[in-house]
Every structure is written in C-alpha cells, then in structure tokens.
Image: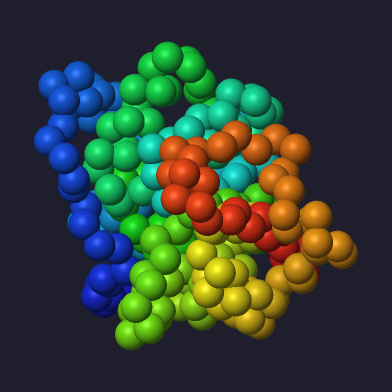
Amino acid sequence: MDHPERPHRNFYGRLKGKHLKDSQKGYLDEDLAALSPGAVSWDDNPTRDNLDLGALFGGRDVWLEVGFGGGEHVIHQAAENPDVGIIGCEPYINGVAMLLGKVRKASVENLRIYPGDVRDMFDVLPDATISKAFLLYPDPWPKSRHHRRRFVTPEHLEPLARVLKPGAEFRVATDIKDYVRQTLEEVPKAGFEWLAQEAQDWRDPWGDWISTRYEQKAFREGRTAHYLTFRKT
C-alpha cells in the first residue's frame, strides 16, 4: 500500500520563543508523552490512521482548541467540563510548556495535547466526531500578502467542517477587525451558520469564558474583542 504524500505546511511562524525554564523543560520531558492524543505526526503515523477517540476519552464528547497559546482557556474548559474530552493543538513549544505546568496544578485527566500543526490533527480525526471547536485570538497575519495563512481560509475550514458533528459549535475570538471581516466571509461558505441576532451577541463573551493573556494585551493596547459563534450545518 502506498503511503500518502507528506504535504508541505507553512502556516505558523516561530515555533520557539524565549528560553525555556528548567521546570518547563521538565514538563516537556516528563509529561508531554503521557498527554499525547496518539500518533498524529507524519513521522509517527505515515499511513494517516484515524485516532480512536472512544478509546482515548471513554466515549465522551470531544472538543478541539486550535492554537491554545498559553493554555489558560483550554485548561479552564477541561477543569469545568470533566464529562468531555478536549484536544488542544499548539505548535509554539513555549505555550505547550506553559500548559503542561497548568495541567500539573489543575490535575485534569480529560485533556490531550498535540504540540504541532492542527492540520496534522485533521488528518487523523474521523469525520463528524468533534462536538465543539475554539479558535481564540489566532495569529492575525496582518499583511495582505499573508492573509492566506490565516486559519479562516478554505484550507483549514473545510477539514474543520469535516470533523465537526452536525450542530457542533465553533467559537472564534479576535481583536482584529479585518480578521472579523474575513471570518464572517469565509466561515459560512464552509458550512457554518453565524448565530448572532443582535450586537451584544458578538460584543459580549460567552458565559463560560475566561480572559486570556492575549486578550488582556489587546485591551491594554485599546483594541476591541469580538466573540463570534457559529453552528455547523
């Protein structure tokens, strides 16, 4: 059997920032493997076999966070919703290390972490298996020539739509007005319905929201947050 060809992917920018603390290196060495969702990367899963989500989370509903940053939101959701399983994807290794430290403190057992491109995860998620997805303060790629790298493009939205269950919720938070424009143009084309009925529906955060460090930075710099909720049709 021929293996699928590995795609070239260049969606994210830097993968490592400031120097890791010794404690963070310890989290990566000691904890990350046990919190892996399974064989996701092409190196470990060249035939692109699907993940067994039933075995991974015991039959619970599964949520997905795309690019969890420092992990504040995904750990909050995991702690507040022990009856669901959550997969968080983040290629920026410093953010992964930060989340692993939070996992130790919170002692959650329903969270799995993939330190890489979410498109690798899309390759191995079965169709219509994710009940909720989050895209929170994604990289804005502000230059026009880089807009194709934004998550809200067909390259990313089509596989997201494939893995979401009908009726699944997709939440997007951003402080960038042009990202809002592109989101509202592209997400409905991929098979989603925007659920806002009045202005407060996108001005006010969700009831279970926890503000992240990226959002606090946006507020300090005078930008306005937008909270967009979509439903997979």
Q: Judge by depth and name the residue closer to the eye, 48 or 88.
A: 88
Residue 210: x and y in percent read 60, 34
**Camera-side residue of 147 and 221:** 221
Numbered label tally: 0
The answer to whether residue 126 of the structure is visible from this angle is no
Image quadrant containing the N terminus: bottom left
Instruction: Give the percent coordinates (x, y) of residue 112.
Output: 44, 36
- In the picture shown, does residue 181 fall above or below 230? below
45 or 111, nearer to the observer? 111
- Residue 225 visible within the image: yes
Task: Give percent across and percent down for residue 31.
Answer: 29, 24
Classify 93 as above or below 170: above
Going by the picture, which residue comes out furthest to the right? 197
Q: Is residue 58 left or right of residue 38?
A: right
Q: How is the image coloured?
A: rainbow
Q: Along the horizontal axis of the image, is 71 left or right of 6?
A: right
What residue is shown at x 65% (from left), y 25% (from top)? 80
Question: In which quadrant of the rendered view does residue 171 lie?
Answer: bottom right
Residue at x 65% of width, y 75% of height: 184
Determine whether 50 is above or below 29 in the image: below
Q: Residue at x 56, y 77 (%)?
A: 182
For the point 50% across and 23% down, the residue is 109
